[in-house]
Amino acid sequence: MKRSADTGGQPDARPSVGRRLAAGAALAALVAAIVVVLVGLVHEPVRLLAVLILTVGAVVAAWTALAHRGALRVVATVVAGCAVVALVVLLLSGSPVRLLVLIGLIAVSAAATRAALGSTPGRADSRSVGPARRGVLLMNPWSGGGKVGRFALVEEAHRRGIIPIVPQRGDDLRALAEQAVTDGADVIGMAGGDGSQALVADVARRHELPLVCVPAGTRNHFALDLGLDRNDVVHALDAYGTAVERRIDLAEVAGRIFVNNASIGAYATVVQSDEYRDAKLATVVRLFPDLFGPDGRRVDLSFTGGDGTTAPPADIVLVSNDAYRLDRIGGFGRRERLDGGTLGVVSVTVDRALDVPALLAAEAVGRVAEFRGYREWTTTTFDLQSGDSLIDVGVDGEALRLPPPLQFRSLPGALRVRTPVDTPAGTSMARPATGRAVTRLFGVLAGHPDR
């Protein structure tokens, strides 16, 4: 696996001295808490193991409760509470002073972690905003298997004083969004999939209006990385009331805005498949042998890699609005932030004779980044050449055919976006897992840029 980085001349967003000190305090307090447990229970291995398991369970459950809403949040909160109660019961049979010290160290570590990670550059623009005066919500009634009707979004919008606009077959969504702006909308939203979100986001950014994303599509990757609970569709409407507003990036290819990613090559062919929307991984597994087998044709793609040299022939190229932590080509992963001001680029080169089984195995277990033909880097612009007259491109899941050359560019801070005040995105675009948080603490302590 090869990885390289090109920041495109962007200035380093290095953590302040205060954040570095907070990271050091968080890690030191965590280590001290572990030492207190080990010293106190070293002669009681069974109780020591139980305390360590309960501690890990409490931490994981607490992160889950913070990052989700609805039933999952309730369950995670109950689990975390039960784990904490069990810890207190186990530790009370020992020294009460040790228990108080342990609780104090955990509290210090938690507070210092928030100070170290909860205020990174690019998120300082987050601000509280009042209710929309004339909020408009466009809805795609066919998206997500009919989520607009299933969640009664028209009725819910009326109840909140939001003007619903439901297109009919053949209506031009962009024209409807533009008309809503002409009629005086001060907040505009979209209930639909990522392709529709991108179109309305383009209208919003052109008129400097804030966007509300309502996850009424099939996959809703954009909503996921905004921190929204994709299973709680109606809750997203709360962003029309008192809300949090921030600026995030958009990306562009051939004059078309996208919020998530564009795929070129074999994966774009997969996107063209009718089965793709309902069964991504199964479709990838079924089609990849045909695409990369003896009769498969490699799409003619040429471009410059992250090291500034001409890249080797690639079968798949993925360009994203800010960088993903990629698990599967067919499923995509998560973005830690939507305000990094970069494009994430991934290329995959497959040796048809040897690599298809390895690629399928890596795809199946969610470890595609370990495939030997995988490369990734970041940049602010990306040019793709081809000898073909038209190239299959999947843009936010929409199948297109575009003439080369394709020019991609990042549009930093181009879009104002509103989310409900209790969305996890209020402190972080995509809350990291616990292990990732520890890694980031070490990064902040070392003074690494926030990328």
Image: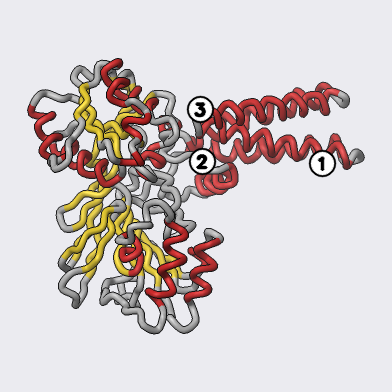
Residue depth check, mark 2 versus mark 1: number of the one nearer the observer: 1
- For image coordinates 87% across by 26% down, the residue present is 94
Reading the image, the residue beneath label 2 is 20
Local crowd size for mark 1, using a 10 Å CA cut-off: few (<14), some (14–19), many (≥20): some
Tell me the quarter of the picture where residue 418 sits.
top left
Marker disc for residue 84? none
First in sequence, mark 2 or 3: give its number.
2
In percent of width and height, residue 188 lies at: 21, 30
Residue depth check, mark 1 versus mark 3: number of the one nearer the observer: 3
Q: Amino acid type of disc 3?
A: Gly
In percent of width and height, residue 205 lies at: 18, 38
Local crowd size for mark 3, using a 10 Å CA cut-off: few (<14), some (14–19), many (≥20): few
Where disc 1 sits, the SS reads helix
Q: Amino acid type of disc 2?
A: Arg
Tell me the quarter of the picture where residue 159 sits.
top left
In this rendering, the answer to whether 50 lies above or below 329 is above
Q: CA distance from mark 2 to mark 1?
A: 32 Å
Reading the image, the residue beneath label 3 is 70
In percent of width and height, residue 207 lies at: 13, 34
Reading the image, the residue beneath label 1 is 49
In percent of width and height, residue 230 lies at: 42, 36
